[in-house]
Image: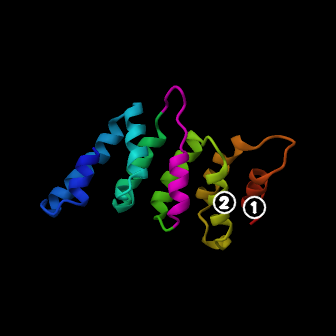
Amino acid sequence: MLGNLEVALVDPNPEPAERFRLKQFVAATAEGMRTRELASFVERLIKDEAGFFSKLDSSVQSRILAAYGNLHLTPPLKADVVADWLATHPQASSEVQLAAARALARLGTAKPEPLVKLVKLVAATPAGERDPQFVLLLEQALKPHVVAGQPGEVNAALESLRNK
């Protein structure tokens, strides 16, 4: 699938219609997969040095993130790579941000740091410009990292989301 995206995004030969078709094929393939191979593909795509994921149209990004967020694997999948990507791409479209936040809320993360970084970005946004659904999904992703009786950065991040 990465090879198809490379052709669609980098190769100078395909016509625009073929580029579009290849991107749609990759998104549709991802939507049909329910295996760890999809998780590996998405993680490699997001971490790719050539930035293939960032070069995709937001509709394709959203479809791939939604497919990733719907994976139910054993052992459970964690979406740290999604949180890291979103924290470094705050300019992502609202459609992509919501798809990423849904994946984060469903899958969670192994560590809270990327989520706390996202909260800090959200906290810096004026309250009227925040998407309430994004904020709610971010809260859901953070809650498993709360340790009762041990206030810390996660509790402060949740508090900053709730109070602004």
Residue at the farthest front position: 49
Dot 1: few (<14), some (14–19), or many (≥20) neighbours within 10 Å? some
Q: Earlier in the sequence, mark 2 or mark 1?
A: 2
What residue lies at 52% left-to-right and 58% top-to-bottom? 86
Asked whether residue 34 is in view, the answer is no
User: Percent x, y for residue 85?
Assistant: 50, 56
Q: Secondary structure at mark 2?
A: helix
Asked whether residue 41 is in view, the answer is yes
User: Left of 50 or right of it: where is 141?
Assistant: right
Q: Which mark is residue 119?
A: 2
User: Left of 48 or right of it: where is 18?
Assistant: left
Instruction: Kindly identify the amino acid type of the residue bearing the numbered disc 1.
Output: Ser
Say above or below: 159 vs 65.
below
User: Percent x, y for residue 163?
Assistant: 77, 63
Q: Which residues are magenta?
A: 72-90
Q: How many marks?
A: 2
**Front position in the image: 60 or 89:** 89
Q: The C terminus is located in which quarter?
A: bottom right
Is 141 magenta? The answer is: no
Instruction: Kindly identify the amino acid type of the residue bearing the numbered disc 2.
Output: Val
Q: Are marks 2 and 1 in contact (CB under 8 Å)?
A: yes
Q: Secondary structure at mark 1?
A: helix
Q: CA distance from mark 2 to mark 1?
A: 8 Å
What residue lies at 24% left-to-right and 47% top-to-bottom? 3
What residue lies at 78% left-to-right and 51% top-to-bottom? 155
Q: Which mark is residue 160?
A: 1
